Amino acid sequence: MSQNIQLKNPHLEGMPSDYLYHLAINVPDTKNTSDIQKQFGDVRVICTGGTAIRMLELAKYLGKLLGVQDTSEPVDMCAKGHRYALYKVGPVICVSHGVGSSTFSVVLHELLKLVHYARCQDPIFLRIGTCGGIGVTPGTVVVTKDAFNGLLRNEHEIAILGERVVRPAQFPESVIKDILAYGGRPDDGFQIISGNTMGTDCFYEGQGRTDGAICEYTAEDKMKFLHKCHDLGIRNIEMEASFFASVTQKIGVKAGDICVTLLNRLDGDQVNAEKKEEFEHRPFLVVGRYIQHLLKK
Amino acid sequence: MSQNIQLKNPHLEGMPSDYLYHLAINVPDTKNTSDIQKQFGDVRVICTGGTAIRMLELAKYLGKLLGVQDTSEPVDMCAKGHRYALYKVGPVICVSHGVGSSTFSVVLHELLKLVHYARCQDPIFLRIGTCGGIGVTPGTVVVTKDAFNGLLRNEHEIAILGERVVRPAQFPESVIKDILAYGGRPDDGFQIISGNTMGTDCFYEGQGRTDGAICEYTAEDKMKFLHKCHDLGIRNIEMEASFFASVTQKIGVKAGDICVTLLNRLDGDQVNAEKKEEFEHRPFLVVGRYIQHLLKK
């Protein structure tokens, strides 16, 4: 039976109104959300990704693929908030989240409240992105299994009321299985694998790079670290996975993280932008087919 | 004696070229950076802030104030990177960093490398932003003294090579003193104070809000936490201070964090956007006058 998601916050019951500040979406009456339901109630899939421009491209791509968008350009429904872009094409919204957990955290809390108020049925949250690979060919698409934080633990840690709180960080197996089964095709010319992902809070020191403004370890320390990651089944590094997994797992909403590797970190740190555009399109293909499968159900 | 900043990364010496990936700025020859010096060598102040639109507004405001910008609109010099916007007006650049430390971290490392390659003399990094206040009238401008993390410690913690690394997080007294001395005027109609700032990784649970998608504490727990913050001299909460202080202190570059409070968290969690625009202009006034003072030196 399909159902609306239940948030993990009893205080919301007592709030007469709610303002999703960073999305600039007003919920004037939390007991009667019919306007929000009209606008967003049909949403089944929430796609998220770093930049606004990539989310616009994804919206255009999915609109065409699903046959739900006319020739007009999708409109940013959160433009007034100036921070995140949100495009809707039929039952899918595509939302930018910026770089890393801190910024993703803000918009994910508000998106969860949005689909709750809109009474979306069985919504699925997906993230697409770029990342560094570990021991895989650049251009490989990695679907995250277990998400590790920068401490090499399969969990996410945040400070709440001044104390460390640790939460598990796994993505649901059923989602991973379906993305792998329906997202890729043998003649795509690239690999899709499931693997563990490390989500760090820093692109440079946090990911063992030696090309940031600060670096206090040797090239040998770095390689030892990357090999240790590889031994833990970590095949890619980005900046959101452990946060994303922990919050969606806590709420009990389905989610998946699909990233394309731009480089193999065992070979270097600098990102070669040459094939970036071609590589960035790969998660579009995968997510598009997976969503087609979801909507057929 | 004025001088170029020294980065804390010996590996950079051995890199023949460098690509500041997220800024989309190429340094083809790290031993001969004359092109970068021509473009950015005169930069004295690096202003940073959350959104691209606010940084454009700041650039226009400073261009006019300093008399260095003609009537044309400043151009985003990092548009190709799609992630951060950078506007240059005379000896000042205004750069967006998104929401929180994770995204700020990426651009700050690259900006530090940029001013290093450009051989900028005695650059000063400033951040302007909005924040929640604790026990201060909404609209108050807070100049950060000591930066606390979400664990209520006056330090910043990051994971490097899988281990916790803790770094001090203070802003230089001389910068704070000058911002207070030159930034405000008695007839401004608002207060500028120096106070401690807590920088968290999460806007909702991390800041003790009860209006996120998840909340597992009571309203009493939250108030106890906010009063504990207040007892530590914390007058505002945002998402960047401890990171920003720790990196600039580590490198030994001057920096200041200037934020306007949009609400008093002792009175509630929801952000009232009514006076947002008026309040957001206040750090412009403060930073503008401080920069005028700097450039007179």
Image: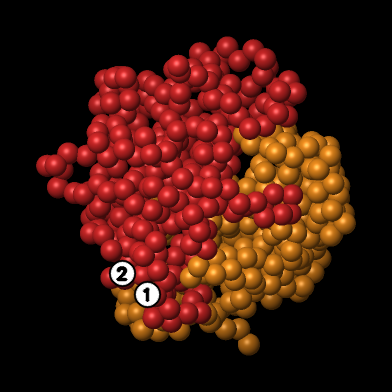
Chain colours: A red, B orange
Is B212 in front, or is A81?
B212
- Is B171 situated left or right of A167 in this image? right
Quarter of the image with the C terminus of chain B in it: bottom right
Quarter of the image with the N terminus of chain B in it: bottom right
Say yes or no: labels 2 and 1 on the same chain. Answer: yes
Residue A73 visible, this orientation? yes
- Is B275 situated left or right of A195 in this image? right
Q: Which mark is residue A223?
A: 1
Residue at far bottom of view: B1
Dot 1 amino acid type: Met
Residue B19 visible, this orientation? no
Specify the quadrant of the image occupied by residue B34: bottom left
Is A268 in front, or is A151?
A151
- The residue labelled by disc 2 is A266
Dot 2 amino acid type: Leu
Sequence-wise, the earlier of marks 2 and 1 is: 1
Q: Label 2's element?
A: loop
Is B14 in front, or is A175?
A175
- The answer to whether the residues at label 2 and label 1 have Cβ atoms under 8 Å apart is yes
Question: Could you tell me which residue is drawn at 54 percent across and 25 percent down?
Answer: A5
